[in-house]
Amino acid sequence: MSEAKQKLVFVYNAETGFFNKLTDFAHKIISPKTYACSLCALTYGKLTMRQEWAAYLQALPLEVSFVYKNEWKFAPIRNTYPLIALQTGENRVEVLLEAQELNHIKSLTQLQEKLDEALRTATGETMG
């Protein structure tokens, strides 16, 4: 691992703000299959993060950060969300899983396997 502290960044296909959160919540309840953030749908229940996902993240030897797409400072790198990236320095980031791939993942187990594989490739280390 490099000298810079690495951080795993989850960028949701959602925006900050009370109205946006309320709309997202309603969308998850009323029409979950059409909800725009596949990452949110996999990792969160109706109100809180899934316990299995929280335990998985806690076991990772990386700092973890969650941001909304309008908060991600590396937006010019990718403009489709959600995505998962590895930040390896103040201005260095590598996208590990893009929206297209995340949108095809059907289970939390599959997400964890894909992320483990992407992290092994990016860091050369075993994660989780």
Image: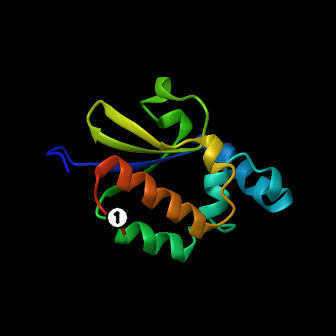
Question: Residue shown at 53%/76% (left/top)?
Answer: 51
Question: Residue shown at 29%/53% (left/top)?
Answer: 124
Percent across and percent down for residue 47 are 64, 67
Q: Is residue 48 visible?
A: no
Image quadrant occupied by the C terminus = bottom left
Question: Residue shown at 21%/48% (left/top)?
Answer: 5
Q: Residues within 10 Å of mark 1 (few under 14, many from 20)?
A: some
Please identify the residue farthest to the top as the structure is shown: 76
Residue designated by label 1: 127
Q: Is residue 42 visible?
A: yes
> Which amino acid, by three-letter code, is at mark 1?
Met
18 in relation to 78, above or below: below
Please identify the residue farthest to the left as the structure is shown: 3
Query: Quadrant of residue 98 in the image?
Result: top right
Q: Secondary structure at mark 1?
A: loop
Q: Nearer the viewer, residue 60 or 126?
A: 126
Percent across and percent down for residue 120 are 36, 56
Question: Residue shown at 65%/66% (left/top)?
Answer: 107
